[in-house]
Image: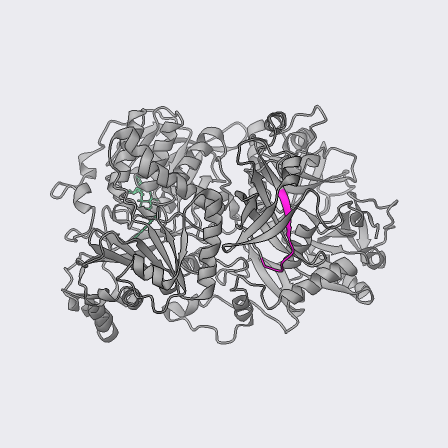
Amino acid sequence: MASLSRALRVAATCPRRSRTRGLGLRALTGQAGPAAEKSVPYRRTLKDPQGPSTVARGPSQPLPSTAHVVVIGGGSLGCQTLYHLAKLGVSGAVLLERERLTSGTTWHTAGLLWQLRPSDVEVELLAHTRRVVSHDLEEETGLHTGWIQNGGLFIASNRQRLDEYKRLMSLGKAYGVESHVLSPAETKALYPLMNVDDLYGTLYVPHDGTMDPAGTCTALTRAAAARGAQVIENCPVTGIRVRTDDFGVRRVAAVETEHGSIQTPCVVNCAGVWASAVGRMAGVKVPLVAMHHAYVVTERIEGIQNMPNVRDHDASVYLRLQGDALSVGGYETNPIFWEEVSDKFAFGLFDLDWDVFTQHIEGAINRVPVLEKTGVKSTVCGPESFTPDHKPLMGEAPELRGFFLGCGFNSAGMMLGGGCGQELAHWIVHGRPEKDMYSYDIRRFHHLLTDHRRWIRERSHESYAKNYSVVFPHDEPLAGRNMRTDPLHEELLARGCVFQERQGWERPGWFTPKGTAPVLRYDYYGAYGNRMHEDHAYGRLLGDEYTFDFPPHHDVIKKECLACRGAAAVFNMSYFGKFYLVGLDARKAADWLFSADVSRPPGSTVYTCMLNHRGGTESDLTVSRLAPGPQASALTPAFEGDGYYLAVGGAVAQHNWSHISTVLQDQKFRCQLIDSSEDLGLISIQGPASRAILQEVLDADLSNEAFPFSTHRLVRAAGHLVRAMRLSFVGELGWELHVPKPACVPVYRAVMAAGTKHGLVNAGYRAIDSLSIEKGYRHWHADLRPDDSPLEAGLAFTCKLKSAVPFLGREALEKQRAEGLRRRLVCFTVDEKVPMFGLEAIWRNGQVVGHVRRADFGFAVDKTLAYGYIRDPSGQSVSLDFVKSGDYAVERMGVAHPARAHLKSPFDPDNKRVKGIY
Ligand SMILES: Cc1cc2nc3c(=O)[nH]c(=O)nc-3n(C[C@H](O)[C@H](O)[C@H](O)COP(=O)(O)OP(=O)(O)OC[C@H]3O[C@@H](n4cnc5c(N)ncnc54)[C@H](O)[C@@H]3O)c2cc1C
């Protein structure tokens, strides 16, 4: 019998092929084929041991000729989606599985479910999965799913890690997830076989547990079938038929199989690592890569029974209780890519590569020393998909209406399956998910990236390698950088710009006074024979961000912010999305799409939201009404009818584009959406000195009378035609200059030359984050999301509810207003100088009433500011009196800090500064 320590020793000394043999493990079959002889859990419950190829036997049921929805893939995601579709009343949904249920990745999963992750939405998704497998399915079917609640234990070997766990604990309080931070001695008492000598502490979550894949999928499909759904195994999908409708929109028409076709308007691609191949059948890009992921199952360990599952993040290993043994798995920096992604891999496993796996053994033995003398019973190494940002791929594909994705689960497809299956079902049935699923929505990725091989591969590698890294609030990827740079990139780099990455764009984060910090080519953290960068200034600065305290450059960001408040700052926001909405129906479309009245006379600029039909906020943006120009240019396209210029955050530009396109298609408006993002730069000059500076650069009168707030016009800047807009996202007097690409550098230099004597500085998005929260401006996808209405978010002024004009989301807002708000976004200030980042629990009169969505330090008010939605625990609507009357505290890492609630922004509450009143 091989023991883990022997594996470690042998791996260190033997050439690769002989290592596995040297361990005395059973011989395995070839890399791409099924491992017929392997002894692994679940196998016997699912596989027909001697039978002929199941596919050769034909489909397990006759195919219907039509179906409302066809789900492709019978793994965790396919089964969960089918079940939730059936529960939402979709009659006759069909699941097609190429082989047998679970035969892809799901059958050999470790099945761990941890309830706490550093995302509020994910905590909700996990809670739903847990409810389904531990309660609902059993109640509905009478079948036990195999759920085991043995608890979960997260190990911290350093302070930052324990800080992260304390953050999770605070967030858990907002969701009723019980957790306890334990000392090393308490941990030892709970888990006597554990070495706690090198521990800082642990987080114990008693209601975590393990899912059984076979039991779960059987119960899910049984429950779905009872509600009229159909599961057809042994039926590979071979094609997706597409039709083009009268408006030129591509839509799903049918699913083709080896055994006939099913006409359907809706397909859900839950094909796991094969999802890219299924996407190709429909011309849909699915940006994921397949990688090997492994665990080994040990022989019996005396005294391990009933112990909680363990995640030792710092050692990058997990220890799952497997009856009276453990499964030991981990995430390495040199994972193996599965290049060929064979479609002949039912119930398949790979040979375990001990070269790769060995790195986990030392950590596992260190944590549970008895493992050193414990044998390895079997190895489980299977394919799993990883994505460029470590988040799943869900929602309707931008290339094809009716084609939904439910794939790319980054080794969390069991625990996220229930929550995601439910959201997918809502998406299909109601056109929107219930929760904020933006982070999972395939439409978050810019379309130029979704088939960019290097970007997908590098970023997905980093996802895998950092799977267990601490999630720091200001971390940035090192992979897939410099994909999209704007005309000012080199200019700003030379001035010390430290860039952030958003959807492939490089945007300024902050400016270091200590030289330049270019982002170098991705070195794969030294894996696969790559040389690690020895001198990487950017990497070093990023390392400074790996803290939950204020980073060392806190005071540098402070200087940028205070310069903006006291003199002026220039922000390069060229990565913004810049769209034109033009055409005969453009006005009708604008009235319907935008919550505010944007159809004011040409020359006006309006801050507005776009809503979904549930009144949730899909976007906030500025919309400028255009007058037709004498000739078409990057600054004014040729158009008939009406024209609008839309400026949206670059990170969410694709989401905006997709939202608008979908609405235009659904409403059949005759207008065009034109993307000019790459043709125009955007330079914003903000602060009390901005007028004096720009008056030297622009050929226009910038007085309040001649150029009022919320207006725009074409002017010349240093001789170049630009569109100037009087706007502010930081609460100061300021202008945005929308500049044709070739003119960006000369205009920027002219602004800098004029600004020097006025104290103008370069500033980045870290300053924008701080300045905007201080002023009380919302950030979409932080304190304003698709599950928040503008009324709840304090943005009622962006909604034309006093007019009679119908707009998308209006009915939902009217209903909400009539019924009263169940929650409200509130601003809190904390006098103690503690850093906060979001996810902290909000206490009111001794009860948790919500959690922080967004927090930052405000340098002018010299306080931490935090925004979060609060509820009344009694279930009543949240009145302004309720907000004003409570005693508040914000809990950060288990410590409650007294806080003050504000109904208006504490900085310049009367909005004088944007009007130029100083
Ligand atoms: C070793 C290991 C351990 C893991 N541990 C955990 C864990 O502890 N917790 C956790 O949450 N997650 C874990 N995961 C991840 C989790 O198991 C996966 O994310 C999940 O099983 C993926 O489910 P799926 O439905 O997306 O894919 P799959 O299970 O692969 O299902 C896809 C299905 O689609 C079918 N298919 C493909 N092409 C076609 C076609 N053309 N026509 C019809 N059918 C088709 C396939 O046959 C397959 O059955 C682990 C993964 C691995 C590899």
Q: Residue at x 53, y 32 (%)?
A: 875
User: Does the stretch in magenta take in 276?
Assistant: no
Q: Give the camera-side residue of 618 and 840.
A: 840
Tell me where residue 404 appears, x and y as whole percent. Answer: 43, 37
Q: Quadrant of residue 570?
A: bottom right
Q: Quadrant of the N terminus?
A: bottom left
For this orientation, the residue located farthest to the left is 50
Query: Height in image: 401 above or below 649?
Result: above
Specify whether residue 213 is in view. Answer: yes
Tell me where residue 266 appears, x and y as whole percent. Answer: 41, 31
Q: Quadrant of residue 123?
A: top left
Q: Residue at x 77, y 34 (%)?
A: 600
Tell me where residue 668 appears, x and y as whole percent. Answer: 58, 28
Q: What is the image's colouring?
A: one colour
Q: Residue at x 79, y 43 (%)?
A: 711
Specify whether residue 332 is in view. Answer: no
User: Does the stretch in magenta take in 832?
Assistant: yes
Is residue 132 rendered to the left or right of residue 370?
right
- Count of picture labels: 0
Is residue 609 rendered to the left or right of residue 84?
right
Q: Give the camera-side residue of 714 and 704.
A: 704
- Magenta segment, which residues? 826-835
Tell me where residue 464 appears, x and y as whole percent. Answer: 39, 58
Query: Height in image: 391 above or below 521?
Result: above
Q: Quadrant of residue 377?
A: bottom left
Is residue 510 rendered to the left or right of residue 178?
right
